Amino acid sequence: VAAARSGDRPALDALLRRHHDRLFALCRRLTGNEADAYDALQEALIAIVRGLHRFDGRSLFTTWSYRVATNATLDELRRRRRRPVPGLPAEDGPGAGPGLRAGFAPAGTGSGPGGRAAPGGAMPSVGGFDEAVADRMDIDEALARLPDDFRAAVVLRDLCALDYAEISEVLGIPPGTVRSRIARGRGLLAAHLGNREPAPERPNPGP
Amino acid sequence: MTEHDLDALASDLLDGLLPADEAADALRDPAVARRVEEMRSAQALLRSVPAPDPHRREAAIAAALEAADRADAHPSPAAAPGPRPAVPAEVGDLAAHRAGPRPEPRQNASTWLAAAAVILVVLAFGGLIVGTQVGSDDDADTSAELSTGAEERDATASDDGGGAASEAAPTTTAPPTGQAAPAPSDESAEADSGSALAAEEGVLDLGAADSVDQLAERARIRVDALAPSASGDETLDAEGLGDAASRLALTGCELPAEELPAGATLEVVATATLDGDPVTVWLFSDGGTERMVVLDAACGVVGRRTLG
């Protein structure tokens, strides 16, 4: 990191390569589809190289880069929501994916919006539509139904394996809020994946 | 126990936040155990992210490195300490524009501030000479302060440009833009104040559009119209384009350096309205391909298109 900061181009190259895949995974889960993930990741990588001089080493570079990537991705999602592309389905439904291109369902599947076939051949394809693809579309759709704040907290915890303090730093919210968002987000995610009615926003009185 | 309590407890159990004995007690409740398992399954699905495409991976890293090269070629004053390798500017044709006779907007600002400082100093010294008060030290102090203030403002102006200008310098200084051209007549009435200002300044105005795609189509038509023709009408004129770009630099946005690929040539800067919001449209040729970037009033990128 220090070498990259000082202008050592091979060091910067190596740094980007080392962190590319995990940042892609974060963007992929936050956006809900590969195409938007690549766009968001591009913004994130550029933000990282442009902001590297501001990285002061008080946190891990990994945490800092997650913060940059999370912000870049959420910004990208907000921008895209403001500027929907004509011809693509509207994203105003609760089942719509967070990304610009969400809303596609494979022809003939009758699947809800949120999932889509991946460009670039990253997804396995056996018989056109295998179980793995179905699983991923389910998780994409379920994640898309979470509010951005909940989705970010859950993804940072369950995918990126950050602890609550690190997530607090990435999202700029108190650790207690992180904990509640993760719990609520996990509960909603599990409910959506299990076709179970999610808990209402206001707690029901218990027995 | 409410659903929220159940989620909170299961989440804590999943993260191992409870002591072992409390966790064992909690997991004796089938509802809690089931919720933990549901969350664990969701966690496993969430982690099964497909690997990125290797080609896109390389392209993304290359683009980021290019952005770093551009930033190094025009370092910000607040940039990282330490030596940086000398990296030549990648947009040679734009650099050539910068070397041209047309003054840059920031240079204009600096010139005016410097001139103001000189005038103030002269006035202050004039006061020293013709003044009747003996205690003219105050005037001298004041003049010195004013002079220093002007220099500081000048420096501040440079600093302000440091972050953005250092990266956008190639585009700030040399963006050729289209000759003044009228907006589409049926839509020009919808142009907001930004477009109206652009019209006054003689900047190409693409009028009002509902979408980036519509804007791209309109830009494509205008680019075709502006292409050098045998009649000589509406041909690209570097001098006129530069003036328009300078006015844009004063009143609008600059194309972020990372948006301009290495070797690309900026051709046209135009204004327009998108969904009623003022935007600037930047057209450039990238290896023979016409590309378009649209910036909103906050200078954020709201669209990119290839014009075919």
Image (cartoon, coloured by chain):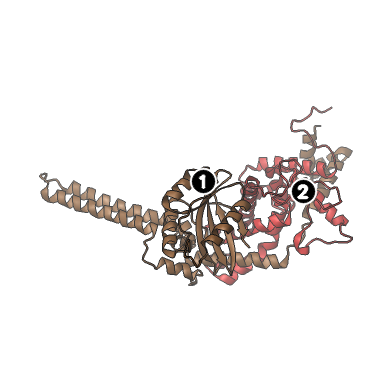
Chain colours: A red, B brown
Q: Position of residue B102 (x, y in %)?
A: 37, 63
In the displayed structure image, the side of residue B306 where residue B71 appears, left or right: left
Could you tell me which secondary element the residue under label 2 belongs to? loop
Q: Is residue B284 above or below residue B248?
A: below
> Marks 1 and 2: same chain?
no
Q: Is residue B88 above or below residue B205?
A: below
- From the viewer's side, name the closer residue of A187 and A37: A37
Residue contact between numbered discs 1 and 2, judged by CB atoms under 8 Å: no
Q: Indicate the quadrant containing the N terminus of chain B: top left, top right, bottom left or bottom right.
A: top right
The type of residue carrying mark 1 is Ser
What chain does badge 1 belong to? B
Could you tell me which secondary element the residue under label 1 belongs to? helix
Q: Position of residue B283 (x, y in %)?
A: 54, 60
Which numbered disc covers residue B44?
A: none
Q: Indicate the quadrant containing the C terminus of chain B: top left, top right, bottom left or bottom right.
A: bottom right
The type of residue carrying mark 2 is Gly
- From the viewer's side, name the closer residue of A200 and A83: A83
In the displayed structure image, the side of residue B20 where residue B274 appears, left or right: left
- From the viewer's side, name the closer residue of A119 and B93: B93
- From the viewer's side, name the closer residue of A4 and B270: B270
What chain does badge 2 belong to? A
- What residue lies at 48% left-to-right and 64% top-to-bottom? B235
Q: Which residue is mark 1?
A: B188
